[in-house]
Image (tube, grey):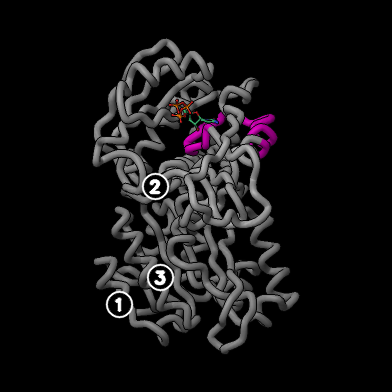
Amino acid sequence: MPGPLENKRVILGVTGSIACYKALDLASKMVQAGALVDTVMSYGATQFVTPLAFRSITHREVVTDLFDPDSTYSIEHIELAQRADLVVIAPATAHCIAKLAAGLADDSLTTTVLAATAPLLVAPAMDGGMYSNAATQENMAKLRQRGVLIAGPASGRLASGLIGMGRLLETPELLGHIAYALGKDGDLAGRTIVVSAGGTMEPIDPVRVITNHSSGKMGYALAEAGRDRGAKVILVAAPTGLPDPALVEVVNVKTAQEMCDAVLQRVKGADALIMAAAVADYRPKNEAEQKIKKSGGDLTIDLAKTTDILEAATGDFVKVGFSAETQNLIANAKVKVGSKNLDLIVANDLTDPDSGFGVDTNKVTLIDRDLNVDELPVLTKYEVGHRVLDRVSKLLGNKTG
Ligand code: CTP
């Protein structure tokens, strides 16, 4: 499964905000992800960053002046607009948003947008006062009503030095919005998928916990893959160092019990549950109220069994488990298919250097309810996510692409 931007035609509209410099990074990341990026700059944008910078990054002509007699692109950009898979305007100034809302077409970018039939994603960037101004808010509401996707802005330090709402989203977040925009009508559109991720933390006392080495990367990649094919994804996440994926609902939990409560509540009415989290099987029976002080001898901590979330989760949804093993991978995973009543289990061998905790790749074996075994090659965790979702999609009776 290629990445969400692979071979996609994206028109990148850039308008006159100091955040233009960030659009260069966005263009670069989109090109690296396999997209064909055509940049259309407003006059204001060219005052901040040169067209040459975008041309160097995208290896494509950059459209600037609608009336440039030397540019064939000034006519072709209408054709570009019609072939595009997505139009992204980042940064979009208040002025640009006002023009879009009014349907004006007085420069290359606005004519391109009007001619385009592809989805439009707008990432505003402006001063906080301009953003909160009723005119801007009304214009944004108009765009939303027409189905335009809006990414951000974020709150934080603005170019003026003031703190407020109006910062352009950072590139990774913008890429999440772009992936969503490209995949929103995918085979999982209209489906809700609950994904768990990370290693739970079971408190011993106010400063110590029992946990495991799970980085959460597999669950987060699954959540992004689900988002990128149209699903509404609810990610129940134990603590990880990972940023929240854009356009995924994240429910933060710490303990196995909190994860259990969150999952059982969210899975009601969902189409699938995928438990990628490393849930503690045991927790300290009693959490000490104060920090346990060192004493002369050894210390024994009594552990109580936690609820098995997958076993407890019953209902009319596709149920997928993970099985992290250090020995007898397939045999152990097969037992879990039966004991946890699973539609699919994803078995991964923790002793393999390409698999498991912390790394970006995974080598997994998929085992279905009938115990058919499908050994996959080493793939990125995002690709593994798609392979798992291919199965989920089939089980849900969706037509996969
Ligand atoms: N799991 C769960 N609730 C638990 C423990 C595990 O839902 N309390 C889920 C995990 O998220 C995973 C699957 O069960 O999807 C298998 O987890 P794993 O740790 O491999 O197996 P266990 O059932 O805990 O058995 P063992 O530790 O003996 O291998």
Extent of the magenta region: 261-281
The amino acid on which the numbered mark 1 sits, given as a three-letter code, is Ala
Q: What percent of the width, then of the height, locates residue 314? A: 63, 21
Label 3 – label 1 distance at C-alpha: 12 Å
Taking the spot 56% from the left edge, 41% from the top edge, the residue there is 233
Q: Is residue 273 magenta?
A: yes
Task: Please name which of the two marks, 1 or 2, marks the residue nearer to the observer.
Answer: 2
Q: Is residue 347 left or right of residue 168?
A: left
Most distant residue in the front direction: 296
Residue marked by disc 2:
4
Q: Tell whether circle 3 marks a residue whose Cβ is less than 8 angstroms from ligand 1.
A: no
Q: Is residue 203 left or right of residue 261?
A: left
The residue tagged with tag 1: helix, strand or loop?
Answer: helix
Q: What percent of the width, then of the height, locates residue 322? A: 44, 30
Residue marked by disc 3:
40
Which part of the image, by quadrant, shows the C terminus? Answer: top left
Work out whether residue 317 can be spotted. Answer: yes
**Mark 1 Cα shell of 10 Å, populated few (<14), some (14-19), many (≥20):** few
The residue tagged with tag 3: helix, strand or loop?
Answer: strand
